[in-house]
Amino acid sequence: MFNRVKNLQLSVIKQMEIRAAKYPDVISLAQGIPSFDTPACIKRRVERALRAGAVAKYSLSPGLPELREMIEISLAKENMFYDWQKEIIVTAGSIEGLTAAVLAVSDPGDEIILPTPTYVSYKEVINLAGCTPIFVPLNEDQGWSFELAEFEQAITPKTKAILFCNPNNPTGTIYGREQLTGLAELAKKHNLFIISDEVYKDFIYGGSGKIFSLAELPEIRERVIRVFSFSKSHAMTGWRIGFIHSDESVIKEILKVHDCLVTCAPVISQYAAMGALEMGEGDVINFKKQYDRRRDLICSRLDRLNKYLRYIKPNSAYFVFPKILNNSDSLALALELLDKVQVAVVPGIAFGPNGEGHIRLSFGRTEAHINTAFDRLEKFFSL
Amino acid sequence: MNDISNGVKIIFKQILKYYLKFITKIVLLIHRPLIISVTGSTNEFFVKSEIKRRLEQAGYDVRSNPKNFNTEIGLPLAILNLSSGYNSYKNWLPIIWRAFISLFKPTFPKILVLGLGIDKRGDMKYLMSLVKPKIAIVTDITQRYIESFSDMDDLVGEYKHFVESINENGYLILNYDNRRIKKLSGFTKAKVIFFGLEKNTPSLNNHWLGEITEKTSSGQTVAVTDGNETKNYSINRFGEHHAYALLIGLIVKKIIINLK
């Protein structure tokens, strides 16, 4: 009984949220949800679709044609060229797309490489597929960058794919073009898929304001599966809507799994995604400006705790991942913070072995929340 | 309170709609651009982009509507080259003023490539009261937006109105692969040119046939046959819809060059 799921765990982030819910005055810097409501233009688009009676039925399994066409247009603006009819699937958030991709490209017993620290749920998706996650540590001293040699060492005949998020959650690191093309070379050499989760790509602070994606390289389009979600970019975590794209030869296989899992993404949310692509650009820019301010705020508050926490300023996303000085048990600290000062954080161990000794703090919350949380943290550390 | 707010919004929208229509008609009367209209259930964006690209490469001064500016409010904004105020009265005020100012602008593109979008009965009639296209294109007809129509005939009625509105000096470019569109050729006085990708089509003088002959990681090759001549085109995009867009772009370019 329950053999398939006996080794699965509810993600530590969700476990922390469930624990935190027992404390009425808790301030959560744990879950990676934006503090903003879904933009009004998106809600209006949904209202229009509701009034037209367009949301009650299934869509085609890969999604509404008009939405997929818009996705193709938006991808082309980012130098990624994919056929909306055969190479794009609208998914129920990014995690459904990732799950469908992992199930499609792997066989039970395969290995999938994950850099660590990385997003909690990848490991569970890999376990669900009957595969083994193989962790490759990121180099904290080099700003959480990765070493290609370590990836190559981790590759075995069982390796099927490399899965990562760029920008990285929880470190906010952006992997550069040189590093990524090196990874692409490895993928070609060892016949691997690359699954790139780019849900935070709209929140880049400074620099060009844009990440490089391997999905831009036509020569490896048959190996790269790119995942995106509207959850973070457009404050739509509750709508569960995103998309996945790759070469036709890959997408036709992923589509079979997607159809088994959800039939189609929620149609009402597909209309919301259309609203996001049609009119939501200004809101994304506004969110980014506010996150940038909050990043400065959280870093300045962390500076006051520099005897206890040491951090690398993130270049993207809305997380900071400080190292705990003089304490290596991140789960114990997270539980103590929750119990003593009612601040919820995510213990670094949740993000793989290399995350231990750190905590993840989200600045997706409001400035008031961040300030209150840090007032409590200062009290905790007896400042 | 909500009812009042909705009522004000509806009145504002109606006033705005007719104000923009009035200004747009005067601007078009003053500058008399050649208008190319694109409509259909899918592929409007890529067809517009391809036409614009081909004509600009040939040295023409072209503008097309951005985003989804193809409705009763969006189309005039596209013609006047203005942004939308969306749901904000405050944002609309400067746009209303700039619309008025556009009456006095000395320069205007020689060619407009305009998408026309329909999502309910009567939309096409209104849009065609704004513009008189010299070249009209129907890309595709599918069941998209069928919810707002009683049946497929009702929806196709919008496109029928479109083709009927093109006069005998105009050109109508129709998708031969779509049965519904093919039939529309019987409702126009304009010169009809067909395009398609289906191989087993009868040999017609006015038919451009495309065939995707190769797909590589960097794009696809499309063999285009016009009459007895076949030429290969490489495009760095994937999918049949880009082959259709290519065919339409080439047809439009040929028509425009011959109009000179």
Image (tube, rainbow, N blue to C red):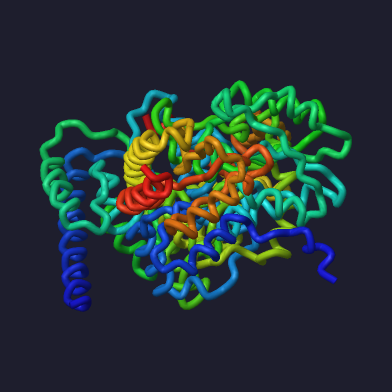
Percent x, y of residue B29:
19, 45
The residue depicted at 27 percent of the width and 39 percent of the height is: B33
Indicate left or right for B87 with A325 as reference: left
Q: Residue furthest front?
A: A382
Percent x, y of residue A356:
63, 41
Relative to A96, say whether A303 is above or below.
above
Q: Residue B192 or B114: which is nearer the viewer? A: B114
Indicate left or right for A119 with A39 as reference: right
Relative to A336, say whether A308 is above or below.
above
Res. A33 in view: yes
Q: Residue A37 or A65: which is nearer the viewer? A: A37
Relative to B62, say whether A61 is above or below.
below
* Quarter of the figure that contains the C terminus of chain A: top left
Q: Residue A82 or B186: which is nearer the viewer? A: A82
How many badges with numbers are in the image?
Answer: 0
Say which quarter of the image contains residue B4. Answer: bottom left
* Quarter of the figure that contains the N terminus of chain A: bottom right
Percent x, y of residue A6:
79, 63
Percent x, y of residue A277:
43, 50
The residue depicted at 58 percent of the width and 29 percent of the height is: A140
Res. B255 in view: no
Q: Residue B123 or B153: which is nearer the viewer? A: B123
Relative to A356, say whether A68 is above or below.
below
The residue depicted at 16 percent of the width and 53 percent of the height is: B90
